Image (cartoon, helix red, strand yellow):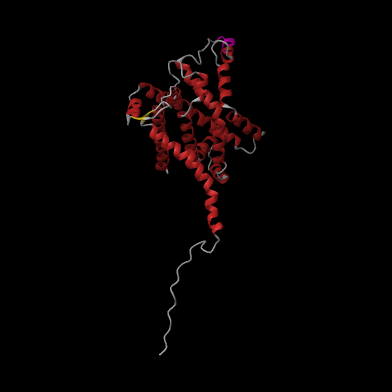
Amino acid sequence: MTTTSLPRATHPRRRGAGLPITRRLAPYVFVAPFVVLFLAFGIYPMLFTLRLSFTNWHGAGSARWVGWDNYTYLLTNPAFWNSLANSAVLWLLIIPVQLVIALAAAILLDNAKLRMRGFYRTAFIVPFVTPLVAVAQIWVVLFDQNYGAVNAVLGALGLPDIAWLTSSAWAKPTLALLFIWKTTGFIIVILLSGLQAIDSSVYEAAALDGAGRMRKVWSITVPLIRRTLMFAVVLQTLAVFQMFAEPFVVTQGGPYSSTTTAGLYLYNHITRGDLGTGAANSFLLVILVMALSLGMVRLLRAKD
């Protein structure tokens, strides 16, 4: 009687099991510098700031645990809500105007028949790469009530001087104009990337159906770059609520705290050495901006 031996059960071989140890560890070695830097300069500072937000600490000595007192102080402080209101007004003054200007410029620059297209693209991006403090100082010179070039032009036209930087009515629009001039070139570049992804055959089909230029923009261009537009809105929302250098250099938060933005109000805690309240303020801003960004993304998904 003969017996047949059954084949031995085989197990799938693990990927990379036969490779030398140096080759198996190579991916982890390559990733390690980023992980170390991210933990040291990303995760650890965030966790330290979160813990600091529950303490009373002025940069020296031991931190005293105060629980939710810093958050309670901020949420019941009119100055905190005033800074958020100022940032919200600046958002309303900046984002709609900037999107219209950037979209119109991007559509013009996307035209292959436009002469000197490379020059115009460079000219639009130059303000964005110019140092912000230098631009803000130029703004101070241009809009000074007594010696500014803008009021000089208004005087030549027989119009009265305007207190661009020293009146509550004009200080925010002046800062908004600075922000628009400084960052619109970057938004144009972002929208151009979205426009160049649209197939030209879509416009050709719309032209055969008798669609005009504005109809193409509203019914084809805007819907197809809706995600790009939303990305630009989220990006600029973060920038507006973090705005610091513009009011710090141009108006110092005045007049009467009318241009004290959320970013500048946070900086004021740091200059006073109230680091615990400043840490709590930063986390409240993170929560607010995250909620706004998620709301915009949710709105986009609902439309999809």
Q: Residue at x 62, y 33 (%)?
A: 121
Q: Quadrant of residue 285?
A: top left
Q: Nearer the viewer, residue 39 or 303?
A: 39
Q: Measured from the top left, where is residue 123 in percent x and y?
A: 63, 30
Q: Nearer the viewer, residue 149 or 202?
A: 149
Q: Quadrant of residue 82?
A: top left
Q: Bounds of the magenta span?
A: 154-158
Q: 69 above or below 162?
A: below
Q: Measured from the top left, where is residue 21 in percent x and y?
A: 54, 59
Q: Measured from the top left, where is residue 249 in percent x and y?
A: 52, 20
Residue at the right extreme of this rendering:
116
Q: Residue at x 57, y 42 (%)?
A: 196
Image quadrant holding the N terminus, namely: bottom left
Q: Nearer the viewer, residue 126 or 216?
A: 126
Residue at the bottom extreme of this rendering:
1
Count of numbered badges drawn on the protein: 0
Visible residue check, residue 219 = no
Main structural element of the magenta stretch: helix, strand or loop?
Answer: helix
Residue at the front extreme of this rendering:
61
Visible residue check, residue 41 = yes
Q: Residue at x 48, y 31 (%)?
A: 239
Residue 12 located within the stretch drawn in magenta: no
For residue 19, side relative to residue 88 (left or right): right
